[in-house]
Amino acid sequence: MKMKILLPNEVFLEREVSKINAKAENGAFCLLEHHVDFVATLVPGLLSFVSDGNEEFVAVDTGTLVKRGSDVFVSTANAVKGRELGTLRQTIEDEFIRLDDRERKVRSVLSKLEADMARRFLEMEEHG
């Protein structure tokens, strides 16, 4: 299979792989070349793959994985490649999950602002 990991501004990694392991919203999964076409929403975690008989690891942020035929595309906001699992796990915990929490807080604040704005417009309509 040919795997491409795409970031918003670059192709992060492009490799021939025989196996991919990743984690989606509904659990971990494994892809092999003979598997059916597949789409998954990725959660922050480790994506591992076997290339030339060697297992390699990439820490990925939220994203989408699409397998179509022998091509696999992973689109993610952030990715970090490394050989040490401990370092990559720490990166996931420190960076990607923290960013997810921050994004949730920002969305919550924006929702409150939108609701407040809608309420004020309704009040303006009531008062003429």
Image (tube, rainbow, N blue to C red):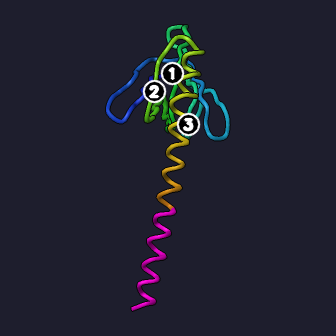
Q: Which residue is mark 1?
A: 58
Pointer 1 with pointer 2, Cβ within 8 A: yes
**Helix, strand or loop: magenta stretch:** helix
Q: Secondary structure at mark 2?
A: strand
User: What are the residue bounds of the magenta stretch?
Assistant: 112-128
Residue 79 tag number: 2
N-terminal-most mark, 3 or 2: 3
N-terminal-most mark, 3 or 1: 3
Q: Which residue is mark 3?
A: 42
- Identify the residue at image location x=45%, y=32%: 73
Q: How far separated are the C-alphas under marks 3 and 1?
A: 13 Å
- Identify the residue at image location x=49%, y=14%: 82
Pointer 3 with pointer 1, Cβ within 8 A: no
Nearer to me, 73 or 121: 121
Q: Residue furthest right?
A: 27
Q: Secondary structure at mark 1?
A: strand
Closer to the camera: disc 3 or disc 2?
A: 2
10 Å crowding of disc 1: few (<14), some (14-19), many (20+): many
- In the shown orientation, is residue 5 left or right of residue 26? left
